[in-house]
Every structure is written in structure tokens, then in C-alpha cells.
Image: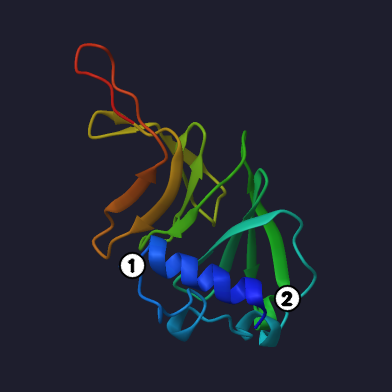
Amino acid sequence: MGFLTYLRRDLEQILFPDRDPHAIPSMDGPFSPNDRLDEATPIGEPIPGADAVAEAADGALFISAGKTIWRLGGTDYAQRAALIELDGEVGALACHPDGRVLACTAQGLAAIEPASGRKTLLAEAAGEPLRCLTAVAVASDGAFLRAMAARAIGPKTGART
């Protein structure tokens, strides 16, 4: 180590006496990088713009890419088909126990039936609008949990984000 390195270390000990000098760097231990993605087996040609993935009960994968939701099934996911193209960008996905695919969109939460491609849009839940959805998960009883990026409440009740 050079002179400046020692000087920096000594100055830090003087300026920050309570700092642990033996702190574990953030990328060590359980947070260390791994090679799992490098070792993964590709499942076919890339889907441009792939953003989110959800696994159905039958093992099929649903992938959002832009405005399209793709269904990948069969051996090595060789069967690929566009399930539906929505009006706007598709974000997070989840699979409902009844077989529907839930997709976060700017308009709300879209529920798509894979067999028919029929879409139902849920724009509010429990009296609250579903806007800025960033994540969705489904409980075993079919209830869905959602995360919203931001929420603004009108002037009568105050403002929150």
C-alpha cells in the first residue's frame, strides 16, 4: 500500500472513530456474485424486451415483453405463442390458482384467461384505484397482493406518496 492509502486510512479513523475498520464489504458472504445465470441452460431464442416471468401450475411460463404476454410450454419450452397484446406496456406477472394470468398495466390489473385470451381489467380494489402497479402476487386462497409505486390522495384527506 502506498503512502496516500495509509494517510486515507488514518484520516478515516480520526474523522470516523465509530466506524468498524473490519466491516465486511457488501459483495462478500451471502451477497457475493455467483455464476448461476452463466450456468443456466438457454430455453430458445431470446424474447426481445422480456421483463417479467410467472410460472403456471402446469409448468408453462408466461413472459411479458412490451405490450405482449408470451406463453412458453412443452418440452424445453419449445412451444411459444403470443397469448395477448395489451393496450399498454405490461409489467409484473402472476398466475392465479384458477389458471388466469394477472398482469400489471398502466390501466390497472389485467386478468387474462389463457384458453380464450379473454381479458378482464380490474381498475380498483377495495375502493382504491389500481394505478402504478409495480408488483403482484397471489395467495393460495386466490387473493392478490399488489405493490403500487406511488399514491396521491385528494385534498380532503391529505396527501401521501
Residue occupied by mark 2: 78
- Residue 17: which numbered mark, if any? 1
Quadrant including the C terminus: top left
Quadrant including the N terminus: bottom right
How many marks overall?
2
Residue 15 vertical position relative to residue 145 in the rendered view, above or below: below
Kind of residue at disc 2 = Ala
Mark 2 / mark 1, whichever is N-terminal: 1
Residue at position x 65%, y 80% in the image: 37
Determine the CA span between mark 2 and mark 1. 59 Å
Q: Tell me the quarter of the picture where residue 86 sits.
A: top right
Q: Secondary structure at mark 2?
A: loop
Can you give x and y, in whole percent of width and height, for residue 50 in the image? 67, 57
Can you give x and y, in whole percent of width and height, for residue 93 in the image? 49, 55
Extreme residue toward the top, this view: 156
Extreme residue toward the right, this view: 45
State left or right for residue 68 relative to residue 58.
right
Residue at position x 57%, y 68% in the image: 61
Residue 32 vertical position relative to residue 51 in the rendered view, above or below: below
Looking at this view, is 105 or 117 the one in front? 105
Can you give x and y, in whole percent of width and height, for residue 83 in the image? 63, 53
